[in-house]
Amino acid sequence: MKKASILFLSAATLFMSACNCDKTCKEGENPFFAEYTTPFQVPPFDKISNEDYMPAFEEGMKQHKAEIDAIVANQEEPTFENTILPFDKAGKLYGKVATVFYSLKGANTNDYIDSLAQVLSPIMSKHGSDISLNEDLFKKIKTVYEKRNESNLDAQQIRVVEKYYQDFVRNGANLSPEDKEKMRAIDEEMSMTSLKLGQNLLNETNAFKLVIDNKEDLDGLPEAVVATAADDAKAQGLEGKWLFTTQKPSMLPFLTYSTKRDLREKLYTGYFMRGNNDNENDNKVLFDKLVNLRVRQAKLMGYNNFAEYVIEKNMAKTPETVMTFLNELWTPAIAKAKQEVKDMQEIVDAEGGKFKIASWDWWYYAEKVKKAKYDLEESEIQPYFELGNVRNGMFHVATKLYGITFEKRTDLPVYHKDCETWEVKEADGKHLGVVYFDWHPRASKRGGAWCGGFQDAGWENGKKVDPIVSIVCNFTKPTGDTPALLTWDEVTTMFHEFGHGLHGLFTTGKYSRTAGSVPRDYVELPSQVMENFAAEPEVLKVYAKHYKTGEVISDELIAKMQKAGTFNQGFATSEYLAASILDMSFETLTEEKTRDVVAFEKEAMDKIGLINEIWPRYRTTYFNHIFSNGYAAGYYVYIWAAVLDADAFDAFKQSGDIYNQELAAKFRKHCLSECGNDEGMVQYVKFRGQEPSKEPLLVRRGLK
């Protein structure tokens, strides 16, 4: 306890000393301390400096604590109005600064932000524990909970009460004083460990560089890929050379087109060895520590393993249900993957190659198989997927389904010059929200793609708060005279993240705890259902236009894409399922002990029969999804939700109109806007009229 307090003061002193303002850092000089005066109250990024964060975090936690203390000090009988509602609305400033800080830590970090995050981690962990383990606060919430059905509360108020009560119980409110102290220590240590794992991964990703100085080694690469590599090299002071990195927009084209097998191996090895290089960024021991902390936490809470603890609140309910589900899909997926290997090996043999297909060969020979079987190459369709056109096609789908419109804004502050901002309006012209798009990779951004936000939809003092959504990607960059031309995977990723964005834009509800809140294995439904629209012929005709000629994609090319729709799904499904099973293998461990996590990974993958030609989509040392608790024991959720999204889209297809506005209105209401009103399956059935079937997913992936 004292150590945490001392750290808090030391951190404040450290970061205040670097502040450019007066020593006291007057509130009027800190953008976080006043209402934003920007249009739509977006964050004033042009006025926020590094030095503003720590004072704002300090004041935010101070105010949050005071609000909690006021609830506890209230001598009246605990009620929804004097306990649950003020708790639900507490921490406004704290949340305000945290959303900006951690959004930028992911999308546009710097040394200062990274260092401050290390300092903040134990402070914020202590702050959270002080609330979740506050006995007096819990007693009041428990009182309201026990009387919830006799207090004239409406259904949503009762749900909020139940959710908060469950939160406190799951965070250790019923533990003994001694065990509560153990929980505090675990929470703090897990927070620091997760943060360090993520930072190490970013360092490893940025550290690896494949530098080519011999033009012959570029053989097979499209001109646009070569030009981008030259630009990247120049930016690193390597003019006249070509640079490739483990960022997917750089790596995947190289793996797909390069004829240099040794260089493909070098680049892919650099990718799958991240965090496993026995250096200062090595993640093996750290990850083992995190797994053991999770075992300890689960045992403390009365569960056999961490997966039980996590999945209990999901749609699946138990780890056994999850594993049964994954294994049912694994059998057809790995069978299809083995056939795909056979098809590729036949090409290797026919070309006189005297080697067996390896993991770094997959993209190269899969592309050859696609050409041979379907007369289709990625390079043939990529010129039709200019980023702006794809974005506009995505907007078109949303407008046709929901009537919403999009207006580009150039008057809103952004955190990086690459960002663009759009105002979203309802069909009647009423403001709905704002979306930030950040498209391209850079060293200050972590890999992958995600949807976050700077302000959640909700209510404040009887007034609706409009959402500010953020979509962050790492898509292929423009180069020279060539605009950003997306791969098909990037096209579907854009639609995917936009689906999350629509979820955020459409969310309604008076209470923060339930507005938009869904189980982890439901949360990918809104995103994945949007992916389905990207490949529909009538949608492609809207956005797929050749970047040079403006020619709309031909029916012949669309037919090839449709025919190749199940191509490589054995690989895609198997590598995903392997990672999901790897996650579950770690999170179902029941005892703390020192493990060689790489050896454990191999054992887990050998057990399910993963073939040598495929690695799990995310290996242990760079499995960022499960470094934080968000997707630990939860990476399975993408394919769980895929059953939902395939079944949901099947409703649109069966109706004969993929833009069926009646169905769209039901989907918006039950699965997006009011999704937090009841349990996930209940809300889905309100839309669909039945529980989902696996059949549409199996058919879509060619697994049946």
Image (cartoon, rainbow, N blue to C red):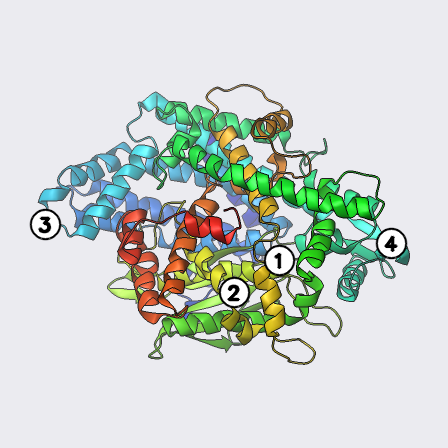
Q: Residue 267 in the image: x percent, y percent?
A: 76, 46
Q: Nearer the viewer, mark 4 or mark 1?
A: 4
Mark drawn on residue 474 = 1
Q: Secondary structure at mark 1?
A: loop
Which mark identifies residue 152? Answer: 3
Depth check: give the residue in front, 660 or 501.
Answer: 660
Label whose residue precedes the other's in the sequence (1 or 2): 1
The residue pinned by badge 4 equals: 217
Return the residue at label 2.
534
Marks 1/2 in contact by CB < 8 Å: the verdict is no
Q: SS of the residue at dot 4?
A: helix
Three-letter code, disc 4: Asp
Percent coordinates x, y for residue 73 in the rendering = 21, 41
Decide if residue 250 is on the left or right side of residue 490.
right
Q: Amino acid at mark 3?
A: Asn
Q: CA distance from mark 1 to mark 2?
A: 19 Å
Residue found at x 60% / y 77%: 552
Q: Amino acid at mark 1?
A: Asn
